[in-house]
Image (cartoon, rainbow, N blue to C red):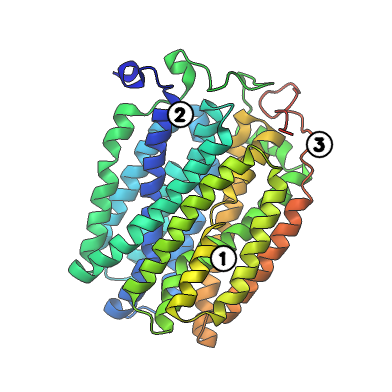
């Protein structure tokens, strides 16, 4: 059946399709807490800081699931991890329909949802792209980033519409069912490696590729001695804080604070998701052609300027303009960051190394998600949170330029030193 479906089309593109769908659904699950903040405040009387804390737990565990998920993917393959993660995510969403206290919210939308989506999706795109593609890798990474954008674009207004029609409890049940339905194409179509089908990666074997991989401990013992690992991690920490943490979680509550209805705010967020889609694909295309460090610097500085303006943009037209510009580089940082990790540390180690870099991203997102809610409670607005995030984004752009892409690291792909992946001109 697999070979028939593959036909004359390289089967890696079918794997890309299944991965795209998984990332899209996982992004939908991760976007749900931002929609639930206001309904939970109204229905259960929880304050925004307490709700933000539970959301930050989910973001944090999503991040810490990434490096271990990368190691588990290296051992068991992406397919099994996708099946496990989707099952946990779907079940936690359905069970949350019956929650009545913050402990349950922390457990279901913090712990279980964070682990489920983290295992299924955190390093999935980087792993699949680097296993199945030697050429067109940046494009594939861009498509995977677009999947995350599409998840936000589709599920945020969908969930708000469901909340308005059937309440927040009914909406999370629907979300959980949709998540569990995706298990079918993953089970039937997903494949772990090109070699499982007698194929090579698209474009041929990667230069310097090795069949032996180090353990996570050995890999990271080498990686943490490299300054580029810390530059990538710190800049991605800032990425998470200035995107998922402050905007992804608090954009709708910020809009409601300025008398913009939740449904209207969701429409603006959908526009942002559409721009994410465009920006991520374009970023993947550009990553194959332009120095990723220069791309990251542009993305971060542009994002910082956008965030400096957000506290003073409180009307619907102004928020739409912000959504267009901010959305273009919301997830555009993923393709160049993943490409730099693969180029510097080796393709077979990208799941582990990028997993820890992505973990830093989620630590930033979790910190900003909670602190932004806390600052809102203390000062009555998100102004300070947005200005701090903007300043951090500008610093992230400066750090990106300090990454020495040309300095090769002894390959982490094997116990014996080897030439790392040659960088593109």
Residue at left 60%, top 58%? 239
Labels 3, 1: front one: 3
Compare marks 2 and 1 and give the one earlier in the sequence: 2
Kindly indicate the quadrant of the structure image that contains residue 262: bottom left
* Residue at 25% across, 68% down: 163
Q: Which residue is mark 2?
A: 77
Instruction: Determine the residue located farthest toward the top in the rendered image.
Output: 198
- Tags 3 and 2 touching, CB below 8 Å: no
Residue on which the image places disc 1: 367
Kindly identify the residue that appears in the image at 63 percent across and 45 percent down. Answer: 337
Q: Tell me if mark 2 has few (under 14), some (14-19) or many (20+) residues whose alpha carbon lies within 10 angstroms of its own.
A: some
Can you say which quadrant of the picture contains the C terminus?
A: top right
Whole-percent x, y for residue 138 in the image: 58, 37
Q: CA distance from mark 3 to mark 2?
A: 31 Å
Instruction: Point out residue 81 in the picture as x, y percentages from the top left corner.
Output: 41, 36
Tell me which residue sits at (29%, 77%) in the image: 44
* Relative depth, front residue between 174 and 271: 271
The local secondary structure at tag 3 comes to: loop
Q: Earlier in the sequence, mark 3 or mark 1?
A: 1
* In the foreground, 159 or 303: 303
Q: Nearer the viewer, mark 3 or mark 2?
A: 3
| Residue 413: percent from left, percent from top | 66, 26
Q: CA distance from mark 3 to mark 1?
A: 32 Å
Q: Is residue 90 above or below residue 410?
A: below
Q: Is residue 352 left or right of residue 197?
A: right
| Residue 421 seen in this snapshot | yes
Left/right of residue 236 with respect to residue 112 in the rendered view: right
Find numbered disc 2 in the image and state the secondary structure of the residue it sits on.
loop
Residue 234 visible somewhere in the drawing: no
- Estimate how packed mark 3 is, as few (under 14), some (14 to 19) or many (20 or more) residues with alpha carbons within 10 Å: few
Residue assigned mark 3:
407
* Residue 293 located left or right of residue 279: right
């Amino acid at each position: 059946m697999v070979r028939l479906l593959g036909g004359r089309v390289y089967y890696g593109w079918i794997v890309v399709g299944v991965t795209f769908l998984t990332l899209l659904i996982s992004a939908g699950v991760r976007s749900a807490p931002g929609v639930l903040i206001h309904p939970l405040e109204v229905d259960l009387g929880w304050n925004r800081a307490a709700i933000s804390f539970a959301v930050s737990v989910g973001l944090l565990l999503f991040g810490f699931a990434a490096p271990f998920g990368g190691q588990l993917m290296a051992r068991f393959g992406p397919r099994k991890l996708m099946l496990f993660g989707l099952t946990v995510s779907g079940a936690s969403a359905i069970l949350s329909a019956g929650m009545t206290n913050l402990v349950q919210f922390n457990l279901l939308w913090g712990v279980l949802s964070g682990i489920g989506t983290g295992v299924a999706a955190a390093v999935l795109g980087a792993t699949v792209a680097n296993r199945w593609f030697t050429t067109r890798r940046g494009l594939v990474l861009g498509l995977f980033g677009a999947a995350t954008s599409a998840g936000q674009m589709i599920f945020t207004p969908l969930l708000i519409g469901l909340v308005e029609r059937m309440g927040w409890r009914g909406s999370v049940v629907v979300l959980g069912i949709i998540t569990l339905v995706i298990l079918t194409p993953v089970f039937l179509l997903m494949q772990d490696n090109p070699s499982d089908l007698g194929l090579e990666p698209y474009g041929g074997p990667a230069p310097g590729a090795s069949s032996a991989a180090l353990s996570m401990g050995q890999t990271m013992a080498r990686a943490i001695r490299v300054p580029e690992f810390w530059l990538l991690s710190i800049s991605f920490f800032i990425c998470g804080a200035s995107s998922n943490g402050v905007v992804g979680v608090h954009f709708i509550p910020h809009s409601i604070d300025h008398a913009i209805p939740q449904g209207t705010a969701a429409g603006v967020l959908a526009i942002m998701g559409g721009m994410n889609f465009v920006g991520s694909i374009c970023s993947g295309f550009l990553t194959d052609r332009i120095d990723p460090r220069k791309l990251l610097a542009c993305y971060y500085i542009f994002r910082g300027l956008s965030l400096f303006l957000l506290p003073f943009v409180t009307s619907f037209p102004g928020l739409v303009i912000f959504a267009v510009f901010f959305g273009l580089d919301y997830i555009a940082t993923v393709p160049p960051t993943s490409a730099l990790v693969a180029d510097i540390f080796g393709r077979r180690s990208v799941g582990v190394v990028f997993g820890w870099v992505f973990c830093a991203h989620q630590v930033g997102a979790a910190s900003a998600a909670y602190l932004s809610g806390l600052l809102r409670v203390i000062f009555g607005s998100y102004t300070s949170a947005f200005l701090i995030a903007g300043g951090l984004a500008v610093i992230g752009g400066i750090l990106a330029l300090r990454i020495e892409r040309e300095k090769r690291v002894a390959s982490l792909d094997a116990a014996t030193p080897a030439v790392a992946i040659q960088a593109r001109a």
